[in-house]
Amino acid sequence: DIVMTQTPLSSPVTLGQPASISCRSSQSLVHSDGDTYLSWLHQRPGQPPRLLIYKISNRFSGVPDRFSGSGAGTDFTLKISRVEAEDVGVYYCMQATQFPRTFGQGTKVEIK
Amino acid sequence: QVQLVEFGGGVVQPGRSLRLSCAASGFTFSNHGMHWVRQAPGKGLEWVAVIWYDGSNKYSADSVKGRFTISRDNSKNTLYLQMNSLRAEDTAVYYCAREADAGPDAFDIWGQGTMVTVSS
């Protein structure tokens, strides 16, 4: 199975400041079809996850442009350019290149 | 509107069975692969199983293989998860999620989840 490792596991941030989360996979996420299936999800307390980013860097419909994804191969990053209060919660990366699908452990973003 | 609603959670004794349902509305259910994802209390997300849009293929996590079965009825716009031989470690909120056309990593619609508690 592909192991997804996120850092940091906790990220206290100041409103209006940037935040960055790293996700590393135990093997390359490049699929045989040439695409890389790495997504980012956000989960607020008591809520289901919601999709932010798919295929490394594609923002899902309705996701603010302060969220951006980058990376390649085994190393990926989610960046929030200016954190807002509604961005608190846990962020997960997920790979869909191989079965079983696997998630990172989650990174908790909270306001300082 | 586009939504998924899970049913069937509850408290069950170890070794017993439970069937979860996920009712889809607002979109063409038969066009999409569907997943079950679970989250133990205070823990992260764990993928459970997937079924192709037409039911032709299924995959499941090793932790549930041989015990859980995913299925769907496209005529009823409903996804199922039959859970047998339940264990304490299966205690979790179970979410169904839609796989978007955008790609296999785009779980774009999620239900609110249904809680399953396995306890004697």
Image (cartoon, coloured by chain):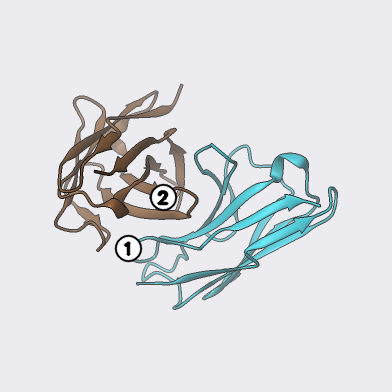
In the image, taking residue B113 as reference, residue B42 lies left or right, namely right
Between circles 1 and 2, the one closer to the viewer is 2
Query: Residue B17 at what x, y percent from top left?
Result: 16, 41
Q: Residues within 10 Å of mark 1 (few under 14, many from 20)?
A: some
Position of residue B82 relative to residue A104, above or below, is: above
Question: Residue A12: which disc?
Answer: none
Residue A38 visible in the displayed image: no
Residue at left 36%, top 37%? B115
Quadrant containing the N terminus of chain A is bottom left
Q: Which chain is brown?
A: B
Q: Which chain is cyan?
A: A
Position of residue B96 relative to residue A23, above or below, is: above
Residue at left 60%, top 41%? A44
Q: Chain of mark 1?
A: A
In the image, taking residue B56 as reference, residue A24 lies left or right, namely right
- The residue nearer to you, when weighing A60 against A13, is A13
Distance (Cα) linking label 1 and label 2: 18 Å
Question: Residue B40: which disc?
Answer: 2
In the image, taking residue B13 as reference, residue A16 lies left or right, namely right
Q: Quadrant of residue B73?
A: top left
Query: Residue A40 at what x, y percent from top left?
Result: 55, 55
**Residue occupied by mark 1:** A100
Q: Chain of mark 2?
A: B
- Three-letter amino acid code at disc 1? Pro
- Three-letter amino acid code at disc 2? Ala
Q: Residues within 10 Å of mark 2 (few under 14, many from 20)?
A: some
